[in-house]
Amino acid sequence: MRNIVILTGAGISAESGIDTFRDAGGLWEQHRVEDVATPEGFARDPDLVLRFYDMRREAIQTKQPNPAHEALARLDRDWDGELLIVTQNVDDLHERAGAGRVLHMHGTHLNAWCTACDARTPWKGPMIDRPACPECGARSLRPDVVWFGEMPYEMDRIHTALRQADLFVSIGTSGAVYPAAGFVQEARAMRVRTLELNLEASQGSRWFHETRQGPASQLVPQWVDEVLGG
Ligand code: NAD
Ligand code: APR
């Protein structure tokens, strides 16, 4: 085995204390998706949207990587094959655990995107007070996250990596949101082996060659030990 592509979702960060979207008590029970995670919602009520992401950006910075993030960073460091981590998460816990190659297909909370000049700038503070873009000075910043109805990032590199993979592993994602939910079928069409690690059965479980259920903080370190050991 030479090439592994890993997809992660909100579930891998759940045990770090970041709410998932669709589990009981998740973000989409507390907020209407169409209000806070669509371009139309932002046009309608920008203050509501900026306040929501300011809150999440602040919360994420107080959280720490958990043993699942740490195990993937260990795999990245110690395995002699090619590893690519594709995440739907907008936190930076993979990077803070030490993982090298991470593609954020839904963007990141820790960048501001200027819709006037398209500059992306690292951003830790709030946006509710409409700060100026450091590049062009326009007061047109928004969180650099992909909303429903927008195109995810890095799709070319992800498709290429899936075509070259020997193994595709999905961790902590409900399989409810495309295109990420379709990666398992794309991998299978290329005869790539597929493994799912999730707390419970997901909407995509039936597509995987193998599914293991349990908390990511246990399943991921166990699986990494298997790869590095054998
Ligand atoms: P999701 O909430 O749809 O799915 C999370 C999945 O992880 C669920 O299937 C859940 O059962 C599973 N899970 C939860 N805890 C787990 C654990 N301890 N071990 C194993 N599995 C566990 O998350 P998603 O598919 O990543 O949603 C994608 C979208 O949600 C992304 O666009 C992302 O921007 C956004 N989001 C991001 C974060 C984050 O950055 N941490 C958090 C919530 C939502
Ligand atoms: N370990 C592993 N998996 C877990 C854990 C855990 N500790 N806790 C929850 N899960 C699983 C849940 O069972 C669920 O299947 O994580 C999954 C989380 O699913 P969602 O909340 O739907 O999150 P996700 O799949 O990442 O959402 C996809 O939807 O709202 C958009 O853009 C947002 O990127 C996000 C996308």
Image: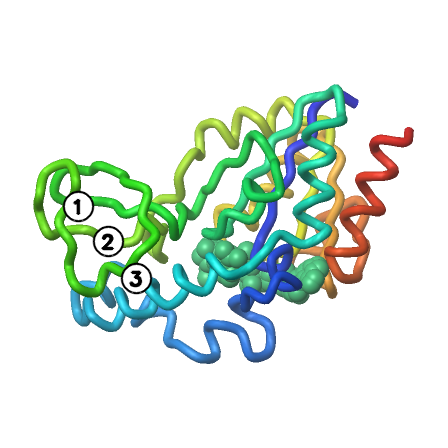
Location of residue 107 in the rendering, given as x and y in whole percent from the top left corner: 40, 46
With 81 as the anchor, is 28 left or right in this view?
left
Residue type marked 2? Arg
Q: Residues within 10 Å of mark 1 (few under 14, many from 20)?
A: some
At x 10%, y 52%, the residue is 139
Between the residue at mark 1 and the residue at mark 2, the CA separation in whole angstroms equals: 7 Å
Quarter of the figure with residue 96: top right
Query: Closer to the N terminus: mark 3 or mark 2?
Result: 3
Q: Which mark is residue 38?
A: 3
Element type at mark 1 = loop
* Identity of the residue drawn at 76% across and 48% down: 220
Residue 228 position within the rendered picture, expressed as x and y whole percent measured from the top left: 84, 31
What amino acid is found at the position of numbered circle 3 in the picture? Thr
Q: Percent position (x, y) of residue 227? A: 83, 33
Quarter, ligand 2: bottom right
Question: Does the numbered disc 1 mark a residue whose Cβ is under 8 Å from ligand 1?
Answer: no
Q: Are marks 3 and 2 in contact (CB under 8 Å)?
A: no
Q: Dot 2 corresponds to which residue?
A: 142
**Above-or-below relation of 146 to 57:** above
Please state, as top left, top right, bottom left or bottom right, where the C terminus lies in the image: top right
Q: Is residue 81 visible?
A: yes
Residue carrying label 1: 115
Tell me what residue is drawn at x 60 percent, y 31 percent.
84
Residue type at the position of mark 1: Thr
Q: Residues within 10 Å of mark 2 (few under 14, many from 20)?
A: many
User: Is 61 on the left or on the right of 112, as rendered?
Assistant: right
**Quick check: marks 3 and 1 in contact, CB under 8 Å?**
no
**Mark toward the start of the polypeptide (1 vs 2):** 1
